[in-house]
Image: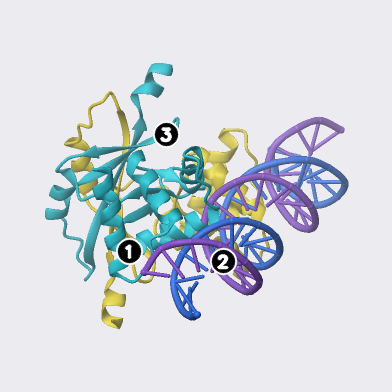
Chain colours: A cyan, B yellow, C blue, D purple
Amino acid sequence: MERMERIELSDELRTRGYRVTRPRRAVWDVLRAADGHLTVEQVTARIGETGTEVDLASVYRTLSLFEELGLARASRLGDSEAGRWELMHPDEHFHLLCEVCGEVDHHVGSLVARIQEHLDVGHGFEVRGVELTVRGVCSRCRAAA
Amino acid sequence: MERMERIELSDELRTRGYRVTRPRRAVWDVLRAADGHLTVEQVTARIGETGTEVDLASVYRTLSLFEELGLARASRLGDSEAGRWELMHPDEHFHLLCEVCGEVDHHVGSLVARIQEHLDVGHGFEVRGVELTVRGVCSRCRAAA
DNA sequence: GTGGCTGCAAACATTTTGCATAACT
DNA sequence: AGTTATGCAAAATGTTTGCAGCCAC
């Protein structure tokens, strides 16, 4: 499984003429393991924990590349300054943003697909995707309050 | 009408012990006139166009205050760095984000309300609000392509 | 070997903050 | 008059870029 993911990345890169490098593998592995929503700072820190050192700038460049290749995407949920990154995954899902602690979780379900079906925005706007974010308070923060 | 809006702001501020100042009126007027989604830079520039000068820092502070008072809110749609501000309005609406030019439009409709009705995220998450963003290409950019 | 990629450092963009002064009440 | 809010400047934060050397191909 681990190996498969790595091979997928190599293919994705090499097929389009990009090189497979240590920073790119490292960022990929971290995003893969994290399952969602890390800041660049967090990605870099987690890479560091594994013994490898990768420069912030390289992480930024790598994430931009991944975005370009359709492998990852950024979002800026909440009020925090920093962008948060996750690997692209095919499942329909939306985000649960806790207004207290700022954490972002996923919620998988058909809701987004159903929205998209019923969507008619008119005005000649060509719909390419739908993003749904639910703001609220997560169970942990409710327990703490 | 103009006057009414200004009186509303004064009440909102004075009721809670805040002062009614030139920068606060200026920011309010600009947001009111713009009907949505200006960066802080844009707000400041538009104030400048009316002859008044207000410092960037004051615009930031004013917008934060408005947010605290529930009068305005920020969003960070798209890939741009800068946050965009709009006045809070009671209508249910969601955002149309053009992936080409980056512009954000509103779309009013019952969709968001209907989503909220059918929403069951489980996990003890307390839902407070729903944000829907539709990504795509606006009619202008489609025409230009 | 060579061209793309990295690390480093410096630039850039956005937002926040400290402090003396101005201005709202 | 008393204090809050402003303007200015400096700092903090997040992201991008130029360039010399390194490494994947």
Which of the labelled discs sits on residue A13, or is there none? 1
* Residue C6 locus on image (x, y percent): 52, 59
Q: CA distance from mark 1 to mark 2?
A: 45 Å
For label 1, the SS is: helix
Q: Same chain for the residues at labels 2 and 3, yes or no?
A: no
Name the residue rendered at 34%, 40% in the picture: A33
Res A75 visible: no
| Disc 3: which residue | A99
Name the residue rendered at 57%, 33% in the picture: B16
* Of marks 1 and 2, the one in the foreground: 1
Disc nearer the start of the sequence (3/1): 1
Amino acid type at mark 2: Arg
* Residue B131 locus on image (x, y percent): 31, 46
| Disc 2: which residue | B46
Name the residue rendered at 44%, 54% in the picture: A22
Q: Quadrant of the N terminus of chain A?
A: top left
Report if the CB atoms under discs 3 and 1 are less than 8 Å apart. no
Amino acid type at mark 1: Leu
